[in-house]
Each structure stands twice: as structure tokens, then as C-alpha cells.
Amino acid sequence: GESVGLHLPTLSVQEGDNSIINCAYSNSASDYFIWYKQESGKGPQFIIDIRSNMDKRQGQRVTVLLNKTVKHLSLQIAATQPGDSAVYFCAEDIQGAQKLVFGQGTRLTINP
Amino acid sequence: KAGVTQTPRYLIKTRGQQVTLSCSPISGHRSVSWYQQTPGQGLQFLFEYFSETQRNKGNFPGRFSGRQFSNSRSEMNVSTLELGDSALYLCASSSETGISNEKLFFGSGTQLSVL
């Protein structure tokens, strides 16, 4: 069935360190993946996306890696800042489905 | 462009009542999706509309319904509210073309509490 899961529900890192948030997905037909950041009291905010024909994509301080062989997705945040503290969700989409399947989320805490 | 706007921001209802939530998408976006977010179940897909047509529906009872107007604004309705309907209801818009695999832009949500 459809499911997108996260390996760790919480993650704490020191300010300035790099963080890696992992995500496993089960539907091999998924061809589009997105990472969202949700701060308290706000809706999810788009961070970065990647399509299944790629295995890596970089943004500003963020990198998403996609391993289709093991159906694994990761979000790397470089030089973390206090403002990076939030819950991070991965989501998958299947062409034509018109819906996203979200993981349960990982709470990232940046320690000063 | 203004972001996705949801109203009201907070709502308190009692069991058995009905509720209507409103969403205005980003200008030019014709696809509107609704999601329910709870601590236990996370983000669950409710339904998606494009050009006033429902294209997909999640696994929610018939008490949950929605519609989209010609200006792309959308409403969702929950009838006969139950305690378990307490959640953050999120609206998202995407795609000026209606093609799948477009990133969603979310509003801040409506926090519904059912007493």
C-alpha cells in the first residue's frame, strides 16, 4: 500500500552542524518527491523537490538525495541555523494521482 | 503574489454541528487540494479539485465534502461533526496548467476543535 515513513521522529543538532533527515517510501511507482518544512502555527512550506529521473538536487543549503533502488530519500541541511528548527515532511506523488502522500515528519531541533 | 488564504483561522464547534472552511488559492492556480493534519495520523489527503471538478478523493467518510468555484476558490464542508474531526485543515494550491507533479503551496490552515 501507499506509505511514506521516516526513520527518526526527532533529531537534535548543534548550530552550524549539518543535518540529515531520512525518509523511506514504499510505492515504486512514485515519480516525484518533495520535502516540506512546517513551523509551529504555519502550514507546510516547500523546501525542495526531485523527480525520479534524478538522484540528487541541490538548493540553498539543502540537498535532496534519491535512491530508487532502496526507495530512500534524504534531506541534507548544511550549516544549520536556529531558524531551521521545525518539523520536516517528505511526500511522494505519482503521475496522475493528483495527491501527495506524506510521511509522519521529523522534528529537527537546532541547539545553540 | 499573495499566498494561499484560509478562513477562518480557528473554529470551535460541538458534536453534531456542521462546518464550512474556505480557501483562496494563489492567483492563477486552478488546482486546490485539502489535507487533514492530526498528531496521530499526520497529513492525510482529503480531495483535490481542478477547474471545479473533483479529480481525486481520499479515504474519508461522506461527511467530508468540498467544492470549487469558477474563480478557483474552494470550500470544504464537514457535516455531523465528531470529536475525531478535530484537526488542522490545510488547503494547498498548485499548477497553473493542471498537470500533476507540481509542488503544492499551503495555507496556514484552519484549526478546528470539536467539543
Image (cartoon, coloured by chain):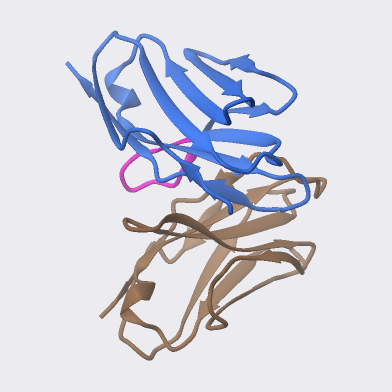
Chain colours: A blue, B brown
Q: x, y (%) of residue B15?
A: 32, 87
Count of residue discs: 0
Which residue is more in the foreground, A54 or B70? A54
User: What residue sits 56% from the left and 72% below the top?
Assistant: B76
- From the viewer's perspective, is residue B15 above or below residue B29? below
Q: Quadrant of the C terminus of chain B?
A: bottom left
Q: Is residue B17 magenta?
A: no
Q: Quadrant of residue B62?
A: bottom right
Q: x, y (%) of residue B16?
A: 37, 91
Q: Is residue A39 magenta?
A: yes
> Is A4 positioned to the left or the right of B55 in the image?
left
User: What residue sits 34% from the left and 70% below the top?
Assistant: B86
Which region is colored magenta? A36-45
Q: x, y (%) of residue B83?
A: 31, 79
Which residue is more in the foreground, A76 or A52? A52
Q: Quadrant of residue A79?
A: top left
- Residue B3 in sight here: no
- From the viewer's perspective, is residue A20 above or below residue B8? above
Q: Quadrant of residue B89?
A: bottom left
Q: x, y (%) of residue A6?
A: 41, 37
- Residue B27 in sight here: yes
> Is A11 positioned to the left or the right of A55 in the image?
left
Q: Quadrant of the N terminus of chain B?
A: top right
- Specify the farthest residue to the left: A112
User: What residue sits 71% from the left and 28% below the top?
Assistant: A52
- Specify the farthest residue to the front: A70
Question: Most prominent secondary structure in the magenta stretch?
Answer: loop
